[in-house]
Image (cartoon, helix red, strand yellow):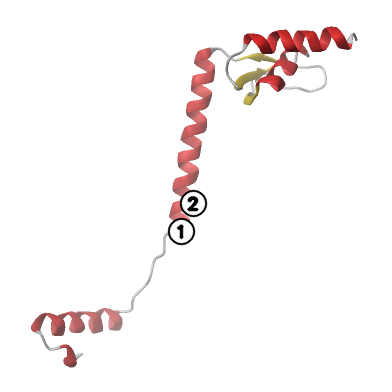
Amino acid sequence: MDLRAYYRKIRELEATLKDTDVVVVSLATPDGGQEGTQTEVARRVACQLVVEGKARFATPEEGAAYRESVRHAHREAQAIAEAKRMQIGVLSEQDITSLRQAMKSLKSGNPEAS
């Protein structure tokens, strides 16, 4: 393999891209690479994968769909994390009764009654 040609191809391909991060779609490879997996990688890495024949650039529609799915997954993860932080307290019937009595005494203006 001619390393100069390899890196020249990467530099030329990299010069054609304007975004810093690029969505690529994997290709089936003889060493076990599976076709169709989408990933967002740095421009340099994307060019290396394309030159090596391990991936292709995603179409604009595929890239937009991938980024939307990542945003959706991030929102879901945030919602789950927020739900885990939620604290729930359980009150017994006796606690509820004493709270009601305390509220009644505060409303009537007699806080000593509680």
Q: Name the spot of residue 7 as percent of width and height, x first.
A: 80, 12
Q: Is the Cβ of the residue at disc 1 closer than 8 Å to that at disc 2?
A: yes
Please state, as top left, top right, bottom left or bottom right, where the N terminus lies in the image: top right
Q: For the point 73% across and 18% down, which residue is it?
A: 49
Against 42, residue 83 (above or below) is below
Side of 13 where 64 appears, left or right: left
For the point 52% across and 32% down, the residue is: 70
Viewer-closest of 66 and 31: 66
Residue at x 70%, y 20% (from the top left corner): 44
> Could you tell me residue 38's position as x and y percent?
61, 23
Query: 113 and 16: which one is in front?
Result: 16
Q: In which quarter of the image is the C terminus?
A: bottom left
**Which residue is labeled 2 in the image?**
81
Picture coordinates of residue 74, whole percent (x, y)? 50, 39
For badge 1, the amino acid type reads: Arg
Left or right: 54 as drawn, with respect to 4: left
Query: In terms of secondary structure, where does tag 2 sit?
Result: helix
- Total label count? 2
State the residue position of label 1. Answer: 85
Nearer to me, 62 or 16: 16
Residue at the far bottom in the pictured view: 112
